Amino acid sequence: MSGRERPRGRLPEGRVRTLFEVDRPDRVLATGGVLLVILTYLAVLDRIVVVADGSGSVPVLAALSLAGGTALARLVRPRWALVCFLALVAVGTQQYVASLPATVALGENLGPFVGDTVSLLTGMSILRIINADIWALTLTPAPTVFAWYLAVRRRYVAGAAVAGSTLGLLVLTGDAGATTTLLGAVGVAAAAGFGTVEATPTAVDASRRSVLVGLGGAVVGASVLDVVPSERAGVGGDGLGGFGGDATTTEANLLADSESLQIQGSISLSPTVRFRIESERVGYWRALSFDRYSGRGWIRTGETEPYDGTTAPPPGPAERVRQEVTLAGQLGRLPALWKPVEVDVPASVDAYQDGSLAPTRSLREDESYTVTSARSEATPADLRSAPEQYPDSIEQRYLALPGDFPSRVADRTADIVGDAATAYDVANRVEAWLEANRDYSLDVDRPGGDIADQFLFEMDAGYCTYFATTMVAMLRTQDIPARFTVGYTPGERVGESSWVVRGFDAHAWVEVYFPGYGWQQFDPTPAGPRRLNEQQRLEQARLSDEDNVDTNETGPGEWSPTPTPTATPETTVSSGDRTATAIPQRSGVAPPGLSESDPTTPTPTPGGAAGSVTSEQAALAVVALAGGVAALRLAGIDELAYRAVWLRYQPRNSPLEDVERAYARAEYALEARTRTRRPDETVRQYAAAVGDEPFQRLARLYERAMYAETASESDADDAVELAAVVVGS
Amino acid sequence: MSQHTTATAGETARRVIDNIGEVIVGNENSIEHLVVALLGRGHVLLEDVPGVGKTMLARAVATSFECEFKRVQFTPDLLPADITGVNVFDQADQTFEFRPGPVFANVVLGDEINRAPPKTQAALLEAMEEQQVTADGTTRTLPEPFFVVATQNSVERDRTYELPAAELDRFAVKLSLGYPDPDDETEILGRVVGEHPIETLEPVATTEDLVAAQTTTAEVTVSEEVRDYVTRLAGYTRENAQLGVSPRGSVALLQAAQGRAVLNDRDYVLPDDIQQETRPVFTHRIRVARGEGDPGDVVASALEAVPVER
C-alpha cells in the first residue's frame, strides 16, 4: 500500500486527498474519534451559551472552525498551525477580558482571572462566571481548529489530546455530564487506538493495546464515579452546613450548597431542631438566593467577597429588627430576615453579590449570632406605584432564561396574568394561580426537560422548589426581575418572640425586585398542605423517639398564642390583601379529615432515585451496557463461556473430525492445567513433555488423523473417551 | 521390483544401521541421517577432518546391502573420463569398447571431491542428478540403486575447488562425523587390534531390499499440513539469509522426512520427522552475509520461529 510509505502528516505536493478513504477504515474511525471528542465539548459549550442566553452561536462558530481547520491542514505546516492556535487563544482571552466590567483595569483583572481559573479547575461550574456565554464562545474556536487540523493531518492522537484536554477542562468544572464524558472518552480511545493502528500498519501489539484499554477504563471509570453522583444530588455534603451528606431532605437540597442547586425528585423532611431565634418580628429566615436558571436547577453567579461590615439598607421605608439566633446544631448559613445590615457572628463573614451573608466556617452547636435586618415596610400601594425601569445590572442578572426555554411558558403566563397592570399585580396573580392550581407533594418524579415548563404544563403537584422555580421563570418571561430564594419558614413558636426552627422548615420562595423598594418576598407554595406534611413528620418523629426533635420548650400544645392571628402586621410576604402566606401558625392539632394513615405522608426515599428513567439515564445505561459487553469480550468472558461448553460437549461427526476435536478439547484442558503448547512444538513433543498416558494415546490417534488422514470409527470412540478422561482429570 | 511394507522397510533400515555401527563407533545420529537420506534416494556430502572414518562409513553401507562399491580419489589432474569411463579401441574387433568408470557402481565414494577441477566435479554431479552418464555422445544409465557419498576436507582449503552453491544443492544432506569422544576412541583402538572389523562385516540386506525400501519410502503419506510446514520453513530461510533454501531443498527435506518416517515404522510423515531432518538437509544450502552468524543459526531460528501448525 503506497499510503504507508508516505511520511505521516505531510501531504504530497499537488495532490488533493479525500478526507475519508474507504479503503482505510482505520483512518475514518480515527478521524471520527477526534470528531466525536470535538462534538462532545462543543455540545457542553453550546449548553453553557444556551443557559447563559448568550447572543453568539456555538454551532456556527464550530462549523467555521472546522472549515478553518480543514483549510489550514491543506495550507500550512504544523508549526504555523500551532502559531494560529496560540493566536486564537490570545484573541479569545482578550475578547473575554474585554467583556469584563470596564471599571476594573486589565492589570487588576489578572488576579481574579487566575483565581477564577483555579476555582474552575477545582469544580466551579463555568455557569457561575458572569459572562459564561462569552467565556464559552471564546473557548470554542482555538481547540476546534487545532484538533481538527491535526485530525486532517492524520495526527489523530495529538488531535484527540487537544480535543480531550478541552473536554477534560469541562469535566473538571463539572459542566460535562456523565454521558458526554463517556462519549468523549470513547472518542479519545477510538482516535488513539485507530490512530495507532493507522500509524503502525503491523497491528497493535498486545501490550500497547492493554495500555490503551487501561487508559480508557480509567477515564470511563473516573467519569462515571465522579460525575454521576454530582448529577444525582448536586450537593457535596461538604459538612459546611451540617446538613449531612443525605441530599434527599428538603433542607440539604436547598441549603447545603451555596453555589448551585439541583432540583430533585422525591424528597423527605428532617424533623431535627436547627436553631432557636429571638425576634420581635417574624418572617421567613432567609439564607441566600440564586440568580441563574439552567432549566434543571439554580446557580449563584458572581464573586464572594469578605464582608466589610457595611450593607446598604433596602431603599424605601424600612424597620430595623434585631434577631438573636442560637444554634442547636452545625449551620453554615446566617438565616435572618431580609435584608441583613449588621451582623455579630463568632466567625468571619462573606458577602454574596445578592446581599446575602454567610459565615466562612460552619457555626457550631450552642454558638449564637445576632443579625439586625432592615425589613422593608413597603405597602401594596407603594409597590403598585413602583416604576418598572430596572437598573441594567438587575435586568442582566435577573431576567435571564436559558436560550432554549420553552416559549409556551410565556404565553401561558400572559394568559394567567391577564390584564394585570403592574409588576406587583402580575406577581400576585402568578403566586395565587400556582397556589390554587398545583398541589403540594414531596413525592414527585423529577421530570425530564425544563423544570418550570414541566411543572406548568405536565405536573400537578410538587414542593416548594418547583413552585418557586416556576414562579421565577414565569415572572422573568414577563420581564419582571425575580430570583430564587432559600431559607427557613418561621418554625414553631415557643414564646412571645421565640421560634424554634427545624430542618423541615427549610423552604424556597421568590423575591421580586421593585425599584425604589428593593427585593420583596412572594411564596407561591400552598402553605396549608406544606405545614400539614411537616406536622405529620414531627409527630412521626416524636412517636419513634428520634433525637433532637424537641427542645425543652417545644412539644405538643405548650404555647397557645393569645393574639389574633389574622391581619397581623407581621405579614412577611407583601401580599397584604391575602393571608395565605402570612405567618405560619403552629397547628397543634391535625385538621379533621386526615387520619394518620393519610397516604400523603411523605416517605423518605433513600438515594433520591426517581421512579422513572430519564432519557439521560437510559443513554447512560446503553453506553454502560455496551461498555460492559465490550469489557466482557475483551476479557474473553464470552469465549470462556463458549469454551466451557465446547470443552465438555462433543457432538459426533466424521471420525476424522471427531478425533481432531477430541484432541483439541484435551489439549485445551491440559494447557489450562500445565502449560500452553509452544508454536514450534509438535503434538508428540508436547504430549511427551506434559501429557499423561491417556493424552499421549490420544495424541497418537490425532497424529494419524491429522497427518495420515486416517481414522476409524473405533479410533473416534477411543479419542472421545480419552478426551473425556483428560478433561475430567 | 517388490515393495515392502513400511514395517519391513523400517526393519531393514534399522538392521543396516546396527550393522554400520559395528564399524563406526559413536556417531549414531550421523549414521541414521545417512541411511534416511539413502532411503529417500538422496546423496550425502561428508565434510570432515581427515581420518574420522568417512571412507569406512561409505564402505560399511555398501557392504551391508551387498552392493557394488567403488571409490574415486579426486585429485587436481583427475579427468571427467576417469569417472564416467572411456571408449577403448579394440584392435582385434576394430571397434570401440566402453570401459565403464568407477561411477558405475551402487555405492560410489568420491573422496575429497573439492580437489578436482570443476569439470571433473561436474561429471560426478551430473551422474548424481540424472543417474546416467554421457560419454562420446552415448548416454548410459547407472545401476539401481545408486548412492554417492562425497567427502570434503574441512582443512587444507588451499589448492581446492570449492563446490558452487548450485552443486552443493544436489546433495540431499551434508553430515559431519567429527572426532569421536574419548570413550568411543578407546573403543575404536580396541577394535583395530587384529583384523579390522570392515573386513569381516557381513551383508544384512540385499540390494533388492534397498530398492524395495526406497520405493516404500517414496510412498509415505505427506499431508497438506506437513507440506505447508516445509514450505514455511524454507520461506523463513529465504527471508532471513542471503541465500535461502531452494525448492530442491524443500523436496529433499520431504524425502528425508519420508525416510525418517519409515525408519520409525510409520507410513505418514509427522512434523517431528521434518524437524529432525531440517538441520542436515537445510544447513549447507544457506548462505549468510559476512558477519551475520552462520547457516546453522538460521536453521535453528527457523525451527523456533515457524509454528508447526498454522
Image: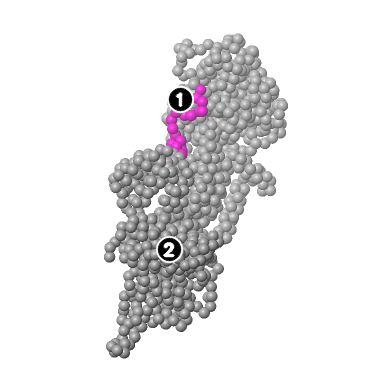
Which image quadrant for residue A126?
top right
Viewport quadrant of the N terminus of chain A: bottom left
Which image quadrant for residue A622?
top left
Decide whether residue A618 is among the magenta residues.
Answer: yes
Which image quadrant for residue A599?
top left
- Above or below, B164 against A394 in this view is below
- Main SS class of the magenta portion in the image: helix
Residue type indicated by callout 2: Ile
Does residue A279 appear in this view? no
| Front-lying residue, A303 or A372 | A303
For the residues bearing labels 2 and 1, Cβ distance under 8 angstroms: no
Look at mark 2 in the image and give the residue it sits on.
Answer: B20
Chain bearing mark 1: A
Instruction: Judge the density around disc 1: few (<14), some (14-19), many (≥20) Cα neighbours within 10 Å.
Output: some
Determine the secondary structure under disc 2: helix
Looking at the image, which residue is at 31% across and 49% down? Answer: A711
Looking at the image, which residue is at 42% across and 82% down? Answer: B79
Q: Would residue B98 be found to the left or right of residue B73 on screen? A: left
Q: In the image, which disc is placed on residue A495?
A: none
Tell me which segment is drawn in magenta.
A604-624
**Labels 2 and 1 within one chain:** no
Look at mark 1 in the image and give the residue it sits on.
Answer: A461
Residue type indicated by callout 1: Ala
Determine the secondary structure under disc 1: strand
